[in-house]
């Protein structure tokens, strides 16, 4: 389209007119100023993602120490490990409403306070009640974070940097979980809980100077603050008039629409976006990611390893660089190709793990079991980190108009955590039923993901949020988008 072609030909940050020499110097200075503010704001936001990762990774290395020191049974510790997901579902239910009512920054601050409270309760706990209450509090905090961090990043970044910056969210989750796993093998569970407070404190301090989302300010009646924050994000010498007009015009269209409710998501105008957002989360979770991540150590032992630690460390060593590669490729390759390659890789990984269990059952040789299990889990972990881990959250943050983002975000985040709980709870039962069949089912779901992405998921690379949302909703489209 003509409008989009013109946009593509413009530099990332247009500068005020001036002499040619001054213009070039002004452009460089403005660009670096803008990038610095966006980078700093994203860094503050993803401190929450790092906290998310530490919280998810905390329970595995802490299990022996907590069970010994507090004399817990396996059943009591299992409640402690799984109740995080229950808390996250509670946080997810209210995440969109809270983020719309108090803003993106305040929502991150609330989640930090919940996580700090939870870790302090765990640090000083003397029985399993304190542990469980603390774990639920942390769950509520990361339930809020899992929605608000990708949304905030997508709303503050320029369109041709948005994807790469948004996937840093998944990278930091991966780093946090890896750090918790490694530190947990050297330090006590109480010390690890104290370390869990650090990212929250860093984020709380950073939020004092971080700009609020301009799109949230525009939508909820702060026009003066909206332009000031947009200017801060784009640089002092940058001409923001065109971007500001686009956001204002789109926001005015939203004002004429009825106030959103959860049931409104299933109207014709929004059903495509809901299908994409919810569908990606369902396929992400039912592709077996939590089964493999939560039980990787047990899978390695079941497949014939003497210990699960070697395989776990190998998985960590693959996941972090692959997540980093996904960040670098996001704006070059686009969302759809990365998602399809990632889903195909996870399908292959599950297939290999299934074959390792099949080989074990038919006594095809221990070395073959171990080789297939290790290759399968490493391929799965690397492929998932490349795209399926982070991109569904990026797309969720891009496709819903801001009047529906609260309700839609709550629904999508709840579906993700509910799927996580179902798979984690059912996995051991499925393994008893049919170990290799379980992974063949996961492989099939991952294969279906490739088809789902090819048929239904739009490419959002290099487009503004307003262009993406208008293209998926006829009532919001301007004549140039129709």
Image (cartoon, rainbow, N blue to C red):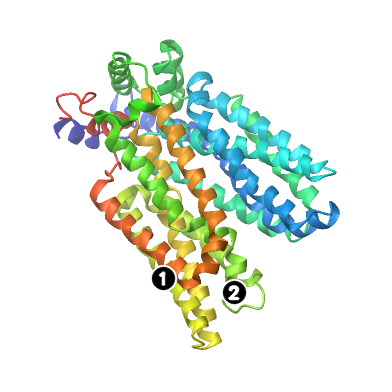
The x and y percentages for residue 441 are 41, 64
The mark nearer the N terminus, 1 or 2, is 2
Foreground residue among 320 and 243: 320
Quarter of the image for residue 111 reads top right
The x and y percentages for residue 447 are 33, 61
For residue 80, above or below residue 39: below
- Give the CA distance from mark 1 to mark 2: 16 Å
Q: Split into 4 quadrants, where in the image is the C terminus?
A: top left
Residue 351's mark? 1
Residue at screen point 51% across, 44% down = 417
Q: Is residue 313 visible?
A: no
Q: Residue furthest front?
A: 433
Foreground residue among 458 and 75: 75
Q: Is residue 242 visible?
A: yes
The x and y percentages for residue 50 are 60, 45
Quarter of the image for residue 109 reads top right
For residue 293, above or below residue 90: below
Residue 45's mark? none
For residue 205, above or below residue 199: above
Tag 1 secondary structure: helix
Residue at screen point 33% across, 20% down = 244
Residue at screen point 51% across, 54% down = 423
Q: Split into 4 quadrants, where in the image is the N terminus?
A: top left
* Mark 1 crowdedness (10 Å alpha carbons): few <14, some 14-19, many ≥20: many
Q: How many marks?
A: 2
Residue 302's mark? 2
Tag 2 secondary structure: helix
Apparent side of residue 337 relative to residue 54 in the rendered image (left or right): left
């Amino acid at each position: 389209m003509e409008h989009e072609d013109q946009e593509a030909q413009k530099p990332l940050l247009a500068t005020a007119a001036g002499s040619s020499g001054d213009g070039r110097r002004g452009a460089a200075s403005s660009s670096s100023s803008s990038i610095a503010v966006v980078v700093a704001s994203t860094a503050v936001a993803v401190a929450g993602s790092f906290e998310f990762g530490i919280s998810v990774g905390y329970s595995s290395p802490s299990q022996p120490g907590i069970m010994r020191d507090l004399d817990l049974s396996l059943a009591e510790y299992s409640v402690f490990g799984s109740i995080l997901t229950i808390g996250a579902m509670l946080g997810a239910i209210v995440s969109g409403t809270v983020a719309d009512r108090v803003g993106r920054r305040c929502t991150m601050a609330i989640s930090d306070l919940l996580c700090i409270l939870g870790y302090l309760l765990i640090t000083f706990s003397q029985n399993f009640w304190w542990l469980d209450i603390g774990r639920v509090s942390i769950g509520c905090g990361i339930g809020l974070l899992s929605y608000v961090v990708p949304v905030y990043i997508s709303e503050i970044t320029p369109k041709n940097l948005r994807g790469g910056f948004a996937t840093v969210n998944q990278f930091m989750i991966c780093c946090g979980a890896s750090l918790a796993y490694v530190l947990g093998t050297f330090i006590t569970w109480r010390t690890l809980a104290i370390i869990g407070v650090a990212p929250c404190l860093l984020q709380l301090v950073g939020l004092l100077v971080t700009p609020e989302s301009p799109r949230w300010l525009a939508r909820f009646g702060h026009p003066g603050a909206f332009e000031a924050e947009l200017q801060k994000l784009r640089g002092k010498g940058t001409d923001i008039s065109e971007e500001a007009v686009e956001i204002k015009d789109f926001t005015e269209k939203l004002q004429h629409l009825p106030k959103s409710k959860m049931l409104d998501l299933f109207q014709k105008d929004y059903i495509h976006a809901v299908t994409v957002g919810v569908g990606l989360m369902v396929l992400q979770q039912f592709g077996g990611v939590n089964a493999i991540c939560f039980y990787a150590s047990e899978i390695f032992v079941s497949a014939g390893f003497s210990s699960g630690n070697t395989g776990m460390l190998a998985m960590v060593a693959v996941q972090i660089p692959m997540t980093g590669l996904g960040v670098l490729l996001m704006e070059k390759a686009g969302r759809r190709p990365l998602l399809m390659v990632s889903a195909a890789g996870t399908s292959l990984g599950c297939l290999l793990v299934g074959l390792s269990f099949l080989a074990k059952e038919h006594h095809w040789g221990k070395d073959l079991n171990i080789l297939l299990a290790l290759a399968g889990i490493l391929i799965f972990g690397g492929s998932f980190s490349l795209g399926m881990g982070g991109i569904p959250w990026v797309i969720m943050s891009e496709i819903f108009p801001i009047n529906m983002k609260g309700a839609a975000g709550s629904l999508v985040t709840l579906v993700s955590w509910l799927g996580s709980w179902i798979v984690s709870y059912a996995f051991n039962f499925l393994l008893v039923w049919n170990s290799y069949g379980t992974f063949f089912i996961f492989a099939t779901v991952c294969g279906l993901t490739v088809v789902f992405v090819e048929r239904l998921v739009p490419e959002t690379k290099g487009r503004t949020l307003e262009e993406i949302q208008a293209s998926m909703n006829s009532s919001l489209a301007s004549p140039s988008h129709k």
